[in-house]
Amino acid sequence: MNNVFGNKRAVLVFVGPALLIYTVIMLVPVLWSLGYTLFTGSVITGFEFSGLDNFAKLFSDPKVGEALLFTLKYAVILTVGQVLVGYALSLLYVFWLRKASSLVRTLVFFPIVLPTVAVSLLFQKMFEVAPQNGIVNEFINLFGLPSVDWFGSPDTAFLVLVVMDIWRSMGFYAVLLYAGLLDIPEEVMESARLDGAGGWTLIRRIVIPMSLPVLLSSIIFSINGTLKVFDSVLALTNGGPGSSTTPLTLLMFRTAFSYGDYGYGSTIALLLTVICLLVTIFIFRSSRRDLTKG
């Protein structure tokens, strides 16, 4: 194996094709998009060099500010929800559902394989108020409360979006964290039990510290995925009511492809890329300190 790694020609033969494909598929579009930030227009109307005008517009555009706030709020709340619910389910699989965990894991994981549009239509029907009440409003009516127009208010539309996305993704994070919990040596758990640790003490002193690496991976998966939310918002609320549930990705898509301004759309995409990069670096640097202490 050392001979192979020491042979530059062999390394070039094995790594070169993959590196070339990655460059063509990933790096070239990124650099191409970066170049668009210095232009306005589209392939139909033609491009015109605008210098740094798109960046000046980015920092003064209220639509970008609103979309950025929504994106950050959605990312934080959904990341906390996904990881907490997933971690609770994984603990349930390991400690209380050992014999039936395969069946439960399959059932809980099932929503992640469903098409986003199908799930969004399902939730639209569940929460609809017209032309007839959905199952949620019917349940509320049983307690004498009036029906709620869930998609008519920014707060309730955001709530439905969060509930839907946590429901869809909790199975994935439960399985991911469950795999991490299985790596904890049984001898360590038995020693802790013999020392009198049990229940919450066992989880707090042994399980959480030893599952920090997989928890960190889950947080990074979740925060990067939620910052780039697009399909579920488009299918469920289409960014409404008004533009209250419009994330940066949807604003970027509409700017580039509906309004024909590739340059400004690419500038919004660059902003989102920088945010994802900064958040990931922040999480890595924070976790490095905690893992060392553990």
Image (cartoon, grey):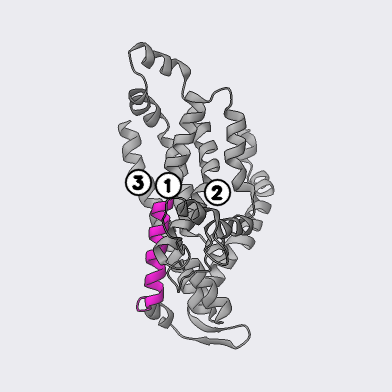
Quadrant hosting residue 62: bottom left
Give the residue displayed 43% in from the left and 32% down from the top: 211
Image disc number at residue 168: 2
Q: What element carries label 2?
A: helix
Q: What residue type is labelled 3?
A: Arg
Q: Which of 78 and 283 is in front in this view?
A: 78
Give the residue displayed 67% in from the left and 44% down from the top: 10
The alpha-carbon separation of the residues under discs 2 and 3 comes to 30 Å
Q: In this view, does 266 lie to the left or right of 278?
A: right
Location of residue 27 in the rendering, given as x and y in whole percent from the top left corner: 57, 62
| Span colored in magenta | 59-78
Q: Is mark 1 on a helix, strand or loop?
A: helix
Location of residue 87 in the rendering, given as x and y in whole percent from the top left corner: 45, 37
Q: Is residue 172 above or below residue 2?
A: below
- Asked if one can make out residue 214 in the rendered structure from this viewpoint, the answer is no
Location of residue 217 in the rendering, given as x and y in whole percent from the top left corner: 46, 42
Residue identified by numbered label 1: 81
User: Is the residue under label 3 in contact with that under label 2 (CB below 8 Å)?
Assistant: no
Mark in the foreground, 2 or 3: 2
Label 1 crowding class (10 Å Cα cut-off): few <14, some 14-19, many 20+? many
